[in-house]
Every structure is written in structure tokens, then in C-alpha cells.
Image: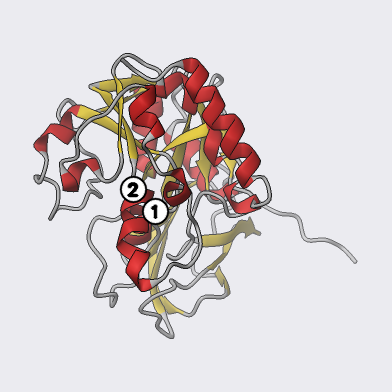
Amino acid sequence: MAISIARAQRHIREWNEKLARYPSRNGWVNSLFHACQIETAAEIVRQRKVVCRQHVPIVLCDVANQGALWNNPAAHEYVRLYFRPKNSFHFKTEGIKSNSDPYRVNPHMAIPVMLVFDFTSVITLADSFFVSGNFASQALALLQGDTNFDGLNFNYIYHDSAVSQDMMQTIRDARMAEVVVRNELPLAHHLRAVVCRTIHEERMLRYLLRNVDVSDVRFAVEKGGSLFLRRGSYITELYTRGGELHFDFTAPSTARKDKYSVTVSCGNSRFAFSLEPSSWRVPQIVNPDPSAEWKIEIEGCTAYLGPVPATVPVVR
């Protein structure tokens, strides 16, 4: 039997009070989290459900740990959500990594999107279970019920600061604790928001969904750094002026270089550059059409795809 609504609500009350003084963890307790590459997020919204690996027709961007993928094949029968964002999975795969990064795996979650689900409505489903760590890699037992839920150590699960060497593995494992739902999870009645890192990535996601009615979906942009690690490269500024593209991008936190491979495309024009993270414009391409599709790639990964809004220079 799934945990009771009363137990779920008590958990929210208790841990909201405990975490109230930590803005970076504000809202974690009310939610469950599923991160995926932007194209996968678009397909989930299009289908109005998250489908387990075993039943999904095509894995659009397989960012799973391939070394641990078959440790527990039973995990493929479940949709997997985390109690918290910013765990080891996100640390490994979130954001564009440098080509020189020895830990880069292709594909990785170059543009992450966070699907935020309602804690109570999901964890109290009849086909909802929870595990105290990584379900796929550790083949942990599926748990249900209030008594088993009482046994989860949320001091470790919600822990979000530096740890001592002797506690590091314990904390890392706890941060990977999951709620899993058999077969599929519909978005209706459960999805709270689809959250992007930046307004530019939200614009790209909406562009991927341009032929879909998304009036019932709440899109949001992260505020306060509570969901994403932001360790990889991503675009921080993007607009056109006089038909020329202007953009800025960040450097990754690891395997930094002086310059990065950047490719800009629009229509039949495509130019490759070697650029340092800074503000740039692309005079080689001029396209004043507001509906023109622009594509920016950083280190071989798509960083943006879609129309780019024009800005009017401020007259001083």
C-alpha cells in the first residue's frame, strides 16, 4: 500500500519548516523531480505522460549511466523521479561539457529541463514506490507504506552542503533516493511545472512544441539556483539587432579552455568559430526575418534552436 495522504502532508509540513531558512532548497519538499534533455521534455509534454524505458518507443537522448544501465533491469519498468534535484546524476550529465573533459559522455543532458511533479499526488498513487538510493545501479528493494517511509533519512536526502570524507558516499547515495511509478505517469493532475534554466531555453522548448496546444502546461524559468547546478556551458544572452545575432555564453566549470568551438547557422548559412566565453555578434549572417530559425552549437552540442527576438537599441 502506498503511503497515506496524511503521512505525505506531515512530511511536507515538517520539512518545509526545517528547510525554510535555506532559499536554495525552497520548494523541494513539495515536489518530485524528473530531469531530461530538452527534446525529451518536448516529447513528454507532447505525449502528456512520462513513460518508463521499457515501454518508450525511442529513447531520444539516452543520458543514463550506461555502465549501470543493466545492473537492475527491473528499473526499466518504472518512471523514475527524485526527491530532490542537484544530485550525482545532474552533476555528471547536466550542461554542455568541453570536448576536452575526460568525463564527457555523449550524449549528455546539454540543455536540461526539469519536470516538477506534485509530491503528494504522485507518492500516494497505488503504483508508486520509493527506494532509499539509486534504483537502477543498486537494485534496491521497492518500498511502500507509512512505516517504510518513516525509515528514509531525509537529513541525508535533502543534505546540500559539503560533507566529510567518511560520510561522502552515504550522502551521495541518499541524494539519489527515488520515487518510482510503474509503467507511466500522466502529466494531468501531477505535473506542477516545466522549468528551464533560462528564458532562451524556455523559448526553444516552446519552439519545439509550436504545433502542440500547451495552454494547460505551466512553463517557468529557474530563480534562485534551486534546481540546476549550472556547471556546464549555456547561453546567457541572445537577441538579434539589424538581423545580426548577438549572444553570450558561459564556460563549463571543468576542463576549461581559452576558446570553445561555436557554430552558428541560419537558413543556408553556417559559420564555425573558436570563441572565448563573452558577448559576441555574428556579422557573417544577416537575417531580419523574426521567424527565422537560428541554431547555435557549443562544443558540438546544440545550445539553442529557434527564432530569436529582436531588440531595439536604447537611445540615450
Q: Earlier in the sequence, mark 1 or mark 2?
A: 1
Type of residue at label 2?
Met
Q: Is residue 137 among the parts visible in the rendering?
A: yes
Query: Which sits in the foreground, 7 or 53?
Result: 7
Disc 1 crowd, CA 10 A, few/some/many (<14, 14-19, 20+): many
Give the image location of residue 312, x and y in percent: 75, 55
Q: Secondary structure at mark 2?
A: loop
- Quadrant assignment for the N terminus: top left
Give the image location of residue 255, x and y in percent: 35, 79
Give the image location of residue 96, x and y in percent: 38, 62
Q: CA distance from mark 1 to mark 2?
A: 6 Å
Residue 221, image quadrant: top right
User: Residue 231, labelled with which disc?
Assistant: none
- The residue at the point 65 percent across, 51 percent down is 23
Query: Which sits in the foreground, 161 or 243?
Result: 161
Disc 2 crowd, CA 10 A, few/some/many (<14, 14-19, 20+): many
Query: Which sits in the foreground, 258 or 91?
Result: 91
Farthest bottom residue?
258
Q: Which residue is mark 2?
A: 176
Q: Secondary structure at mark 1?
A: loop
Type of residue at label 1?
Asn
Dots 1, 2 in contact, CB < 8 A? yes
- Quadrant assignment for the C terminus: bottom right
Reply above or below: 275 against 67: below
Q: Is residue 73 left or right of residue 100?
A: left
Give the image location of residue 209, x and y in percent: 44, 31
Farthest right residue?
316
Q: Which residue is mark 1?
A: 87
Residue 81, image quadrant: top left
- The residue at the point 58 percent across, 55 percent down is 225
